[in-house]
Image: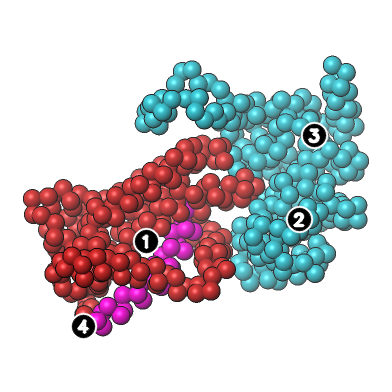
Amino acid sequence: MLRVIQENQYVLENFIKRDLKVKYRGTLLGYLWSLLEPLSLVGIYYFLFDVIARVDEPGYALIVILGVLPYNLFGAIVQAGAVALTANASLIRRVYIPREVFVYAHVGSNCVVFALSMFAVVPFLFLYEVVPGWRLVFFALAAVLIVLFATGIAFFVACVNALYRDVGYVIRVTLRLLFYGSPLIYPISRVPEEYLGIYLLNPLSVYLSLGRSAFMNQPFPFDELYLIYGIVVAIATFFGGALYFRKYEKKAVKFL
Amino acid sequence: MSAPDVIEVEDVHLSFPIVRYRARGVKEAFLELVTGRRHPDRKRDFWALNGVSFKVQRGEVIGLVGRNGAGKSTLLRVVCGIYQPDRGRVATTGRISSLLELGAGFRDELTGYENIKLSGAISGYSPDEMTELADKIVDFADLEEFIHQPLRTYSSGMRARLGFSVAAAVKPEILLIDEALAVGDAAFRQRSVNRIEEMVKDDDATVVIVSHNMEELKRLCTRMILLERGEVITQGAVPDVVKAYAELTQQKKKS
């Protein structure tokens, strides 16, 4: 599966560059939007919960930004994956390129955007005087797991979307549900103990709270067993999606 | 003494689903999705290719003719791997460059130059290698003035010129051309035909060309294949196939 990436290195580079170019084309602020968009979300939730509702949660803005950015990475990969085949139909029908490349290209460009948008975290580190330490490796792990998990789903929805364009709507609804159903705008410690078992079955809950605790120098906010669960789910989803894609993209292409 | 086969097409069948949205119920669609089994009522595939077989040896120039919708373009797509046959087998040896529809895999929003780079990357050339090739391509396409303009501003003739120039520059061992030359002006077509002859002679390239221009085909081809309703009707010497094709079109006109 990784051979596809290696063999099509130049196409992939070309696609990723183009993706990034298209993303900011015609804008005045360009890359700044990758910071402003999540920051505005943080602003909204800070105002809502810290100023208005006064939920007494130390470092609340940092908590939110560390939830929103990785979640955006997940959402962006899945959404881009859904249109990976359909949006490239004209190219796919004219030249043969292994179709995985289209999915990987979106994954790549969204990883770059994610890395750049992480700078939005910096002001909050100063504000709350948080100095991340060696535990940052767990943040990197969380990011990798999110990418694997999202890529697997992207492979799956890319195929299905060629047959049924309903997929776009399903994704939008699901992403909204997960936005509130995962620890984005609240820390996992707010989830009642008796629901935690079910709550952590959502792998995003594991990844997001893992990444956040790593950044804030805190121990795992859950049993280590869930970390293993998260890793297994991410890897299984990735390979499951990739295998599904390999099997069904030939059929999906006929619908383009 | 015969050269090795570089394209082998063996009993290839290819179907397209006829998509009818709404005609199927949601429940049915869902069941199909989950079970992967098809509802017995829904047997509405269109068979674009029905058992096509032929072989092409290195250095041959094959003319593929047939009426609209006979399956010529689909067949080229199967040869270059865009579609996988439902039944049958396709085997090719060597680097394939294809020119299907106007502009092989070009993108409207990119400039001509960026499209050259993209096509190069698709054929496996590094950006540096492509920078070297780009001058030659621009020169052959005769597009110096417009090369940094977005492709959407190009006329169809200009696209075809750029497309052919790229396809020919990447040194393909197999070149597939689908009516792409038809929109170029006479001078460019002349040059393209010369270039194809050169590629065959000098680099031992193999060409499969779809065209409705019999004069061009007569000049270029070593052999021809006539396709009708997804089946090979005749293949062989150029004059024979040209005659068969003429008869086929005549016959249809009368009836």
Give the residue displayed 35% in from the left and 71% down from the top.
Answer: A39
In the picture, one chain is cyan; tell me its letter. Answer: B
Chain of the residue on which disc 3 is drawn: B
Look at the image and give the residue range highlighted in magenta. A103-127
- The residue mark sitting in front, 1 or 3, is 1
Inter-mark Cα distance, 4 to 3? 74 Å
Q: Is residue A256 left or right of residue A57?
A: right
Query: Which residue is painted at 53% across and 21% down in the image?
Result: B43
The residue carrying mark 4 is A129
**Residue B226 in view of the camera:** yes
- Residue assigned mark 2: B159
- Give, as a three-letter code, the residue at label 3: Val
Residues at marks 2 and 1, CA–CA distance in whole angstroms: 37 Å
Gap between marks 1 and 3, in whole Å? 50 Å
Same chain assignment for discs 2 and 3 = yes
Relative depth, front residue between A45 and A147: A45
- What amino acid is labelled 4 in the image? Glu
Element at label 4: loop
In the rendered structure, the colour chosen for chain A is red
